[in-house]
Image: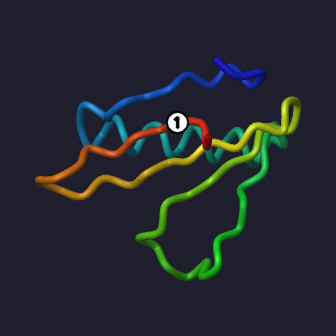
Amino acid sequence: MSDCGWEKIESFSSPSEFKRFVRWIESQRDSGLCDEVVVDDPLDKWADRKFRCKSSSEVWVLQLPDAGYFAGSWSPVS
């Protein structure tokens, strides 16, 4: 668990769980608890997304699902 209260998600159980998580982490960003780390091409909607917890400076990555292959995940960057 991080200072932001984030917990690792090995894989999302469904597309709706992933969508709920995205809304939740975006609300964390919008409320100022974390920052989204800008990627090289912010227009690439298929890029993994990274977020930095403001209280700990930890960076976590949201790996996007790939239907039929990977359910997506949420984990700290090592």
Residue lying at the far front of the rendered structure? 78
Residue lying at the far right of the rendered structure? 55
Q: Circle 1 sits in a helix, a strand or a loop, which is it?
A: strand
Location of residue 71 (image quadrant)? top left
Q: Residue at x 39, y 55 (%)?
A: 64
Q: Is residue 78 left or right of residue 44?
A: right
Q: Residue at x 64, y 71 (%)?
A: 39
Location of residue 36 (image quadrant)? bottom right
Q: Is residue 3 left or right of residue 17?
A: right
Q: Which residue is mark 1?
A: 75
Image location of residue 20, percent across then percent down: 43, 38
- Is 56 or 15 nearer to us in this picture? 56
Q: Name above or below for residue 75 compared with residue 44.
A: above
Q: Name above or below for residue 41 compared with residue 23.
A: below
Q: Name above or below for residue 50 compared with residue 1.
A: below
Q: Residue at x 49, y 60 (%)?
A: 48
Q: Amino acid at mark 1?
A: Ser
Image location of residue 67, percent across then percent down: 17, 56
- Is 27 or 37 nearer to us in this picture? 37
